Structures are given as structure tokens and as C-alpha cells.
Image (cartoon, grey):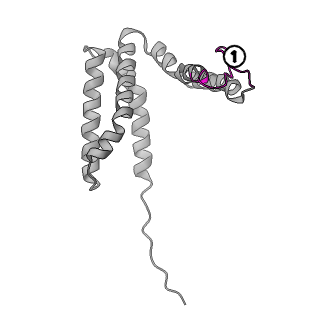
Amino acid sequence: MMAVEAVEAQPRLAPLGAAVTFVLAAGMAPVLVRFIRLSGLTVAVDGLWLGAGLWLVLLHGRGDRLSWESLRRSAPGGAAFGLSIVFFVSSVKLTTVTDATIINALQPALVFVVASSASASPCHIWPGPRSPSREWQWSWPAEVRGQAGT
């Protein structure tokens, strides 16, 4: 007979708790930002610094270290993410949360239209060879679904 070894079960509540916390924070943050009496830039930068500090603590808790190489490689994406956060928080401060959320949700379709000009133009708005595109046809139902969920 073979000996059966006991396998320790992975906790399943920790990832679920993290996901629920993130969804609640991401959903409430734009509404709460509206009531803070600081500029959008100040709120965004302070939030990004707090987030960076939290990630460093979590990274250290796992026993990992932040290297200069990983920092250098992630800097362009981090700068783009930071600009996105600054612009979103500033737009929430200057307009309603609904308007800023709708504008943010429509960005993928706008990026698709602009990016399609670099290749065969499936949307026929930009010059280029005409080609049928399922991606363009399916982007509108996806946007409508995204707006219905917000």
C-alpha cells in the first residue's frame, strides 16, 4: 500500500477578501474624492504614494526585494498609470462622477479607433485599406454593456 501524505489546503478566503476590498474601494473612491477639499493632483499623488508604500510593505512581507532593474522596466507603465489616475481624479473634481466614469469607460473604443489608423483601418474613419473587422463590430456592444454596468 502507498502512504498518503496530508496536503495543506490553501486558504480561499484571503483572495476573495482582497477582491471584495478592491471592488469596494474602487467603487467608492471616485465618490469620496468628490468631497475632499484638495486639488485632484494632490489627492492623486498622495494616493499613489500611499499605494506605493503599501506595495513595498507587502513585497517586504513576502521576503522579496525591489530591484533597480524591475523599477527601471516598470517606470514607463507606472508613469502612464500615474497620469491616468491624476487625470481621472482631476476630472472627478471638475465634473460629476458619472461623466468622468463614462469618459473613462469609453477610452478603449477611442484607443481602438486611433490605433486602427496605424494599420488597416477597420473603422473606415481614417485613411487606409478597407477590411472587414469583427473587432470594431463587437466594440460597440461591449461599450454598451460596460455603460450598463456603471
Q: Is residue 66 left or right of residue 115?
A: left
* Within-10-Å neighbours for mark 1: few <14, some 14–19, many 20+: some
Q: Using residue 62 as the reference point, say whether residue 142 is left or right of it.
A: right
Q: Name the residue that disc number 1 marks.
A: 124
Q: Nearer the viewer, residue 81 or 96?
A: 81
Q: Which residues are magenta?
A: 115-131
Q: Is residue 54 magenta?
A: no
Helix, strand or loop at label 1? It is loop
Is residue 128 in the magenta section? yes
Identify the image quadrant of residue 119: top right
- Depth check: give the residue in front, 54 or 108: 108
The picture places residue 130, in percent across and down from the top left corner, at 73, 21
Where does the N terminus fall, quadrant-wise? bottom right
Which residue reaches farthest bottom? 1
Q: Main secondary structure of the magenta part?
A: loop
Q: Is residue 10 above or below residue 25?
A: below
